[in-house]
Image (cartoon, helix red, strand yellow):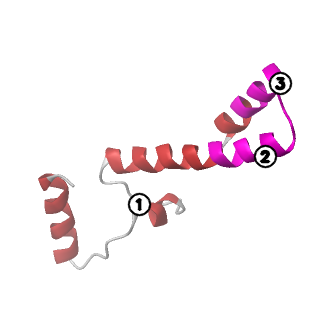
Amino acid sequence: MTSSARRKEEVHLANGGIKQSAWSKAFKSNAVWEEKDEFLDVIYWFRQIIAVILGVIWGIAPLKGFLGIAIFCVVNLGL
């Protein structure tokens, strides 16, 4: 964590705020993202989790070739 991020966190906590984890903010529609990097980390890891889940599904239902890749791209972009 950078020093500026720590300062923001300390100021927020000193003002009576409750620190929320990035994942708890990810599932709230009115969450305020103070740092762009934190938001981008959540997006990155969410896409990784989706990729693993779809990989297992594609392994069980043997989707191969262009059709499998195309459906993966559509689902990944849709979410």
Instruction: Determine which residue is flagged by label 1.
Output: 22
Packing grade of label 1 (10 A; few <14, some 14-19, many >=20) is some
Expressed as whole percent of the image width and height from the top left, the position of residue 13 reads 21, 74
Q: Number of labelled discs? A: 3
Tag 1's secondary structure?
helix
- Tell which circle, 2 or 1, labels the residue nearer the N-terminal end: 1
Residue type, label 3 = Leu
- Tell which circle, 3 or 1, labels the residue nearer the N-terminal end: 1
In the image, residue 50 lies in the stretch drawn in magenta: no
Q: Disc 3 to disc 1, how far (Cα)? A: 35 Å
Discs 3, 1 touching: Cβ within 8 Å: no
| Range drawn in magenta | 51-73
Instruction: Determine which residue is flagged by label 2.
Output: 57
Name above or below for residue 11 compared with residue 18: above
Expressed as whole percent of the image width and height from the top left, the position of residue 61 reads 87, 42
SS assignment for the magenta stretch, majority: helix
Q: Disc 2 to disc 1, how far (Cα)? A: 27 Å
| Mark 3 or 2, closer to the camera | 2
- Tell which circle, 3 or 2, labels the residue nearer the N-terminal end: 2
Tag 2's secondary structure?
helix
Q: Depth check: give the residue in front, 42 or 61.
A: 61
Residue type, label 2 = Ile
In the image, residue 58 lies in the stretch drawn in magenta: yes
Quadrant of residue 18 within the rendered picture? bottom left
